[in-house]
Amino acid sequence: MSPKDPNYDPKKDKTVHKPMMVKPNRLFTETYVKEMKILINEVLDEREYKAKLEGPYDNPNPPPQSYFDLTGREYPVE
């Protein structure tokens, strides 16, 4: 029924709607976000290692192999 209808009663014909659920769209995929987090943490680890080399630390451990460095990670597929 619409307001133009002669039998329209705004109090009686009111429809109650549930709230609409909106799912936000992300700019980046989940895989891209995970890789960026890994990259940022690697950069921060390298920065910390360089600071330790210049500071009063005795023989700091170098950061592990980078996640993005694929040398030595090859494997045969059978």
Image (tube, helix red, strand yellow):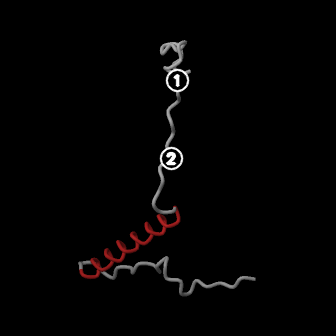
* Pointer 2 residue: 23
Name the residue rendered at 61%, 85% in the picture: 74
Q: Is residue 57 left or right of residue 2?
A: left
Q: CA distance from mark 2 to mark 1?
A: 22 Å
Q: Secondary structure at mark 1?
A: loop
Residue at the limit of the structure toward the left, as seen here: 55
**Which percent across, then down, holds residue 7?**
55, 12
> Which of the two residues, 1 or 36, is positioned nearer the viewer here?
1
Residue 59, percent across and down?
33, 82
- Res 16 label: 1
Q: Quarter of the image containing the C terminus?
A: bottom right
Q: In terms of image quadrants, where is residue 27?
A: bottom left
| Label 1 CA crowd tier, 10 Å (few <14, some 14–19, many 20+) | few
Comes first in the chain, label 2 or label 1:
1
The answer to whether residue 8 is above or below residue 74 is above
In this rendering, the label closer to the viewer, 2 or 1: 1
Task: Please say if 45 is above or below 59.
Answer: above
The N terminus sits in image quarter: top right
> Which residue is the extreme one toward the right?
78
**What's under tag 1, amino acid-wise?**
Val
